[in-house]
Image (tube, rainbow, N blue to C red):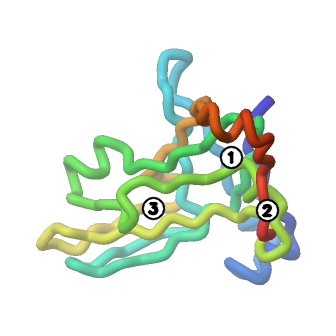
Amino acid sequence: MRDFEKISFEQFCKDIGESKELYDNYKLPIRDSKLTAGYDLFLIQDLEIKPNEIVKIPTGIKAYFEEDEVLLIVVKSSTGFKYNIRLVNQVGVIDADYFNNKDNEGHIYVKVQNEGEKIVKFKAGEALVQGIFLKYLVTKTDRDLGIERNSDY
């Protein structure tokens, strides 16, 4: 099974701010339709990005999923086409053992860069990126050696 949930209010206060109202009202990721692969991740607060500026954005969410799955975070096509916004790491890879880690509960951040020539503004509640859950395969060597996940969290 897989799903998204909010980080705890305690983690929210550390990472974003102490507004209980903001915490209670931001949205969890959803798909636009049953035929959409990606879950839109919504901005918690208004955002302004200057040309060439890099911004680290807290999502306020964490995700759990099966051990043989990965959550990929990618820029929504419309965000890239319209605004020339790119993820700094091109594709975010969230592994199953990131969920509830001791450092930040598995709080997912995205880091984007405005590669355009104009200031770009987004409102809270807009989606810049999306998450896609995928199954992955392991090598025969992993299976033969009985390699288990080794978590550093």
Q: Quadrant of the C terminus?
A: bottom right
Position of 130 with respect to 76 (left or right) is right
Q: Which mark is residue 55?
A: none
In this view of the protein, which residue sits in the foreground, 61 or 132? 132
Q: Amino acid at mark 2?
A: Ser
Earlier-in-chain disc, 2 versus 1: 1
Quadrant containing the N terminus in the rendered view: top right
Element type where label 3 sits in the image: loop
Where does the image place residue 42, in percent across and percent down from the top left? 55, 52
Upstream in the sequence, badge 1 or badge 3? 1
Going 50% across and 49% down the picture, which residue do you hit? 73
**Picture layout, residue 37 above or below residue 51:** above
Query: Of the residues tagged 1 and 3, which is closer to the observer?
Result: 1
Of circles 2 and 1, which is in front? 2
Residue annotated with mark 1? 28
Q: Residue furthest left?
A: 117
Residue 130 rendering spot, x and y as whole percentages: 49, 44
Q: Nearer the viewer, mark 3 or mark 2?
A: 2
Question: Which amino acid type corresponds to the residue marked 3 in the rendered image?
Answer: Lys
Badge number at residue 151: 2
Q: Is residue 93 left or right of residue 79?
A: right
Amino acid bearing label 1: Leu
Q: CA distance from mark 3 to mark 2?
A: 36 Å
> In the rendered image, which residue does mark 3 sit on?
123
- In space, the residues marked 2 and 1 are separated at their CA atoms by 26 Å
